[in-house]
Image (cartoon, coloured by chain):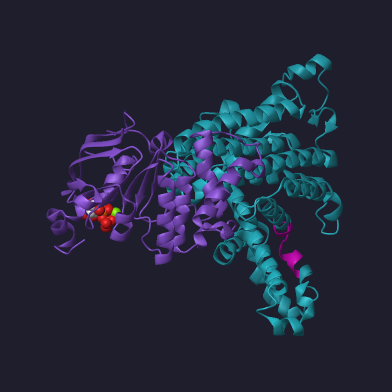
Chain colours: A purple, B cyan
């Protein structure tokens, strides 16, 4: 049995009368790619919001590497080793691609605050090289000096992925990382995700595209109405009638 | 968006220094080469360059920076009264004390962002302004303003010489702070201040401030505690304002509360936006233009206008004078307001954006011959 890196225990979250998460329990094994699938409004993004400190749950705990994350500030959770790709890309639209990737790299190297007023940015060769390498892997190296806000939606997503990867997080949360991408780019992104899978980074990936899910996931959990209704290997999930009913209205996966 | 190189930075520094130090020469033909105005250019330059570190990099629009200007001025005058007429300790105290105030005010106001932050800073500055007239009159001397007196202790100066007959004047280790030498002292301090701002702009710290402006949410989820970054920027810009305030007192040893009025805070916002928010040179350009035209327009009156229009036929100047007179003299602020509206609506990036647009216009013509081959043939000089 391998190590549990993230444990979500009995988490509840309501918005007014709406129960977005109810009795949510989930264990994520270290080094695995864990896919979360489920219909729109099932609470998938809300679950990630709780994990990164964006939302405080009504009750329940989230334990990362043996440490309780509830009540911590978002930057502390990131510094603990969790990075997230958002459902709508969160990048720095006014900065260049290179700067977009260098900033998360600094966060990893320097921590939450450092007052290096008199160091010159152009002397930061290590960080710059690393950022370039990631941008090359992700296929954005040609546009390295363009303004991130001018990218297409799909490219913004890939940039955001690069921003997370450069941090070498212990746990990477991906909220529909290929939505809005052309098929060709989707495949490239999957290839990249497979490549870093070998690196041992744990990933939680929320995805509607079953092609993506079944090609990258080691483990799949199905979330419906704020709770996990099934969990297992891709083959187990494929054959589970409960899943087919909840998720695809009876259609075959 | 290429990262600026060190070589480039040094070049900019050299050009900037040369332009500032030679101001008495090249402003001569414009009729602006007298010490009072030159000192103003340099001092407001420091104010705006520092303000830009907060507003330009983080996007936090403070409407209360005049408070730090005031703190700097009062501190400097007290240093002249109690210690010495040498401005060196005075401006050091100005910077330190305004930094301390900025730390306090920033700590409270930075709990909010956007319009709420602006309103909070404005409220603080107005509070200071009112306190200076009421509770704090023992320190500020209320409406009269804080002035030098012959009977001031000036303990350090007293060690070396007796009190003279008249009021003493300020100096920088013997260099008089009035006239051209005063300008050169201010100019050198401006150059140092500009250099520090350039370092901040091109440091990892500076780029993180820009990132906060661009997307603060992303910054938090990227592992940054954003508040200390903002507070540092706030304190630095407050110290710049304090330095400018100290120098105002150094060139004219009098401190009044009107220096802290909201219009003074508004002026620095205007200068920064006019020149180009977030650009290195922009604020300095804004200062130059506003202070130059203020100097001209506020001195004009109806008679002056008649003279200015004397080349026109009488009937035309008789129409134009009443039309333009509300914009000059006391009405200079009306001109300023109109200019501000024009800039914000048509050129939100300020003069620097205008320069960029012109540059692009020309470089497009020369670097993309494939798209405009015909135009290139017909206007060969357009590539210049
Ligand atoms: N901040 C919020 N305030 C109020 N309601 C919210 C908030 N966030 C989410 N919800 C609601 O909670 C429910 C779950 O939303 P969530 O975004 O987690 O769904 P999801 O599974 O990510 O769906 P999708 O596949 O569409 O992204 C939805 O009904 C949504 O409207
Ligand atoms: Mg979602």
Query: Is residue B299 on the magenta stretch?
Result: yes
Residue B62 image offset from top left, x and y in percent: 52, 45
Q: Which quadrant of the picture is home to ligand 2?
A: bottom left
Quadrant of the drawing holding the N terminus of chain A: top left
Question: Which of B284 and A23 lies nearest the eye of the viewer?
Answer: A23
By secondary structure, the bulk of the magenta-drawn segment is best described as: helix
Q: Would residue B315 be seen by someone viewing this image from the given angle?
A: yes
Q: Is residue A175 left or right of residue B123?
A: left
Quadrant of the drawing holding the C terminus of chain A: bottom left
Q: Would residue B257 be seen by someone viewing this image from the given angle?
A: no
Residue A235 image offset from top left, x and y in percent: 22, 52
Residue B18 image offset from top left, x and y in percent: 82, 48
Residue A227 image offset from top left, x and y in percent: 18, 46
Question: Which of B82 and B124 lies nearest the eye of the viewer?
Answer: B124
Residue at 52%, 42% (x, y): give it.
Answer: A105
Whether B255 is drawn above or below A101: the answer is: above
The stretch in magenta equals B296-306
Residue at 57%, 51% (x, y): give it.
Answer: A98
Query: Is residue B371 on the magenta stretch?
Result: no
Residue at 38%, 63% (x, y): give it.
Answer: A180
Residue at 71%, 36% (x, y): give it.
Answer: B247
Where is residue B85, by image quadrant?
top right
Whether B303 is drawn above or below B113: the answer is: below
Question: Which of B232 and A149 lies nearest the eye of the viewer?
Answer: A149
């Amino acid at each position: 049995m391998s190590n549990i890196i993230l444990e979500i225990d009995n988490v509840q979250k309501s918005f007014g009368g709406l129960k977005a998460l109810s009795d949510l329990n989930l264990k994520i094994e270290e080094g695995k790619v864990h896919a979360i699938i489920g219909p729109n409004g099932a609470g998938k993004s809300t679950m990630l919001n709780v994990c990164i400190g964006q939302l405080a749950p009504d009750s329940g705990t989230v334990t990362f590497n043996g440490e309780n994350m509830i009540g911590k500030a978002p930057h502390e959770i990131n510094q603990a080793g969790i990075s997230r790709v958002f459902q709508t890309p969160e990048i720095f639209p006014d900065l260049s691609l290179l700067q977009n990737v260098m900033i998360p790299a600094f966060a990893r190297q320097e921590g939450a605050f450092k007052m290096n007023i008199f160091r010159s940015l152009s002397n930061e060769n290590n960080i710059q090289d690393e950022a370039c390498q990631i941008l090359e892997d992700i296929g954005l190296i040609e546009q390295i000096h363009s303004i991130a806000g001018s990218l297409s939606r799909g490219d913004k997503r890939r940039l955001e992925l690069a921003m997370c990867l450069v941090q070498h997080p212990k746990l990477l949360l991906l909220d529909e990382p290929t939505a809005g991408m052309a098929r060709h780019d989707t495949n490239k992104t999957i290839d990249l995700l497979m490549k870093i899978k070998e690196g041992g980074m744990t990933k939680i990936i929320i995805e509607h595209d079953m092609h993506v899910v079944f090609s990258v996931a080691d483990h799949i959990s199905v979330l419906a109405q704020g709770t996990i209704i099934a969990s297992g290997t891709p083959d187990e999930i494929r054959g589970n009638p409960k899943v087919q009913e909840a998720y695809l209205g009876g259609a075959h996966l | 968006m290429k990262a600026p190189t060190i070589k480039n930075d040094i070049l900019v520094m050299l050009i900037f220094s040369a332009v500032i130090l030679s101001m008495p020469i090249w402003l001569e033909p414009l009729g602006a080469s007298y010490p009072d105005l030159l000192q103003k250019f340099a001092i407001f330059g420091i104010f705006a360059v520092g303000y830009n570190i907060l507003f330009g990099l983080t996007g936090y629009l403070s409407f209360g920076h005049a408070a730090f200007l005031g703190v700097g001025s009062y501190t400097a005058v007290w240093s002249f009264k109690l210690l010495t007429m040498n401005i060196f300790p005075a401006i050091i105290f100005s910077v330190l004390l305004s930094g301390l105030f900025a730390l306090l005010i920033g700590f409270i106001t930075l709990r909010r962002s956007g319009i709420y932050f602006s309103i909070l800073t404005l409220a603080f500055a107005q509070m200071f302004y009112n306190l200076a007239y009421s509770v704090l009159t023992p320190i500020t001397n209320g409406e009269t303003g804080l002035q030098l007196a012959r009977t001031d202790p000036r303990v350090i100066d007293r060690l070396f010489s007796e009190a003279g007959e008249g009021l003493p004047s300020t100096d920088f280790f013997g260099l008089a702070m009035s006239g051209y030498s005063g300008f050169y002292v201010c100019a050198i301090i401006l150059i140092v201040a500009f250099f520090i701002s350039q370092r901040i702009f091109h440091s990892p710290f500076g780029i993180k401030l820009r990132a906060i402006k661009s997307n603060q949410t992303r910054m938090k989820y990227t592992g940054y505690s954003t508040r200390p970054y903002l507070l540092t920027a706030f304190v630095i810009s407050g110290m710049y304002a304090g330095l400018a305030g100290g120098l105002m007192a150094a060139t004219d040893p009098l401190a009044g509360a009107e220096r802290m009025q909201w219009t003074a805070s508004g002026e620095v916002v205007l200068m920064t936006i006019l020149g180009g928010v977030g650009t290195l040179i922009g604020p300095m350009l804004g200062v130059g233009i506003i202070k130059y035209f203020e100097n001209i327009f506020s001195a004009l009156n109806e008679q002056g206008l008649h003279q200015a229009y004397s080349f026109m036929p009488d009937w035309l100047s008789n129409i134009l004078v009443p039309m333009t007179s509300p914009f000059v003299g006391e009405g200079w602020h009306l001109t300023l307001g109109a200019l501000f509206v024009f800039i914000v609506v048509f050129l939100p990036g300020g003069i620097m954006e205008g320069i960029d647009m012109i540059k692009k216009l020309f470089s497009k013509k020369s670097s993309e011959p494939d798209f405009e081959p015909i135009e290139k043939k017909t206007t060969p000089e357009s590539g210049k």
